[in-house]
Amino acid sequence: MMQLASLTSDDNYFEDFEVGAKIRHARGKTVTPLENVYITNMVMNTAHGHFNEDAMSKTPFGQIISYGGVNFSIVLGLSSQDCVENALAELGLDNIRLSKPVVHGDTIYAFTEVLSKEDAGQDDAGIVTFRHYGFNQRDEQIAQVDRRALIKRKSHWARR
């Protein structure tokens, strides 16, 4: 029988996370007009600030700004490999903060702080709460979001 390659590293199970730990995620993502305008229209966001270049040129922003849903989704995505690739379930997103506008061409980077760990009442997983931060290429914070996830326990899932 063929052996399946591991989808993730072996250091992001429930037991591996320590409250207070900080993780800098390796990748960054440059925001392009394609994802901003496409997703903004797909979710029926009609705020012209996300797709009307002419109107936005007359505002203090001077240009289109990226939809906040795109911004915090990128932060979540950048953090996923390190934090929730061993998740059995996403339990919630809370305390979403969008602190600075993002424009086309900005690059978003993420880092994470482990806020808490708790027993989930089951042998194979526990709950971890993460706070993810997004920063642009100028090291300005653009977003923050808390994420609760049910994470596999190494003691039950490793080497399966």
Image (spheres, rainbow, N blue to C red):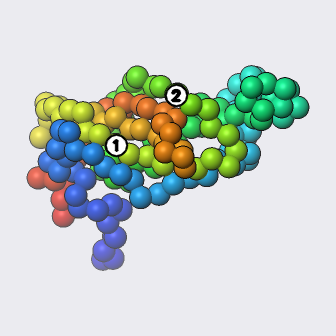
Residue 26, visible in the rendered structure: yes
Tell me which amino acid carries mark 2.
Ser
| Residue 10: assigned label | none
Q: Residue at x 68, y 49 (%)?
A: 105
What is the residue that sits farthest to the bottom in this orientation? 1
Q: Secondary structure at mark 2?
A: loop
Q: Residue at x 50, y 39 (%)?
A: 140
122 vs 34, left or right, is left
Q: Nearer the viewer, residue 150 or 135?
A: 135
Provide residue 132's location: percent of width, then percent of height.
Answer: 38, 38
Neighbourhood count class around disc 1 (C-alpha, 10 Å): few under 14, some 14–19, many 20 upward: many
Sequence-wise, which precedes: disc 1 or disc 2? 2
| Residue 112: assigned label | 1
Q: Which quarter shows the N terminus?
A: bottom left
55 vs 39, left or right, is right
Provide residue 46's location: percent of width, then percent of height.
Answer: 76, 23
Tell me which corner region of the image, top left, top right, bottom left or bottom right, holds residue 35: top right
Residue labelled with disc 2: 99
Between marks 1 and 2, how big is the CA–CA gap?
A: 16 Å
In the rendered image, the vertical position of residue 72 relative to residue 28, given as above or below: above
Q: Residue at x 18, y 34 (%)?
A: 117
Neighbourhood count class around disc 2 (C-alpha, 10 Å): few under 14, some 14–19, many 20 upward: some
Provide residue 16's location: percent of width, then percent of height.
Answer: 17, 51
Tell me which amino acid carries mark 1.
Thr
Provide residue 141's location: percent of width, then percent of height.
Answer: 48, 36
Q: Secondary structure at mark 1?
A: strand
What is the residue that sits farthest to the right in this orientation? 54
Q: Which quarter shows the C terminus?
A: bottom left
Q: Nearer the viewer, residue 53 or 58?
A: 58
Residue 77, visible in the rendered structure: no
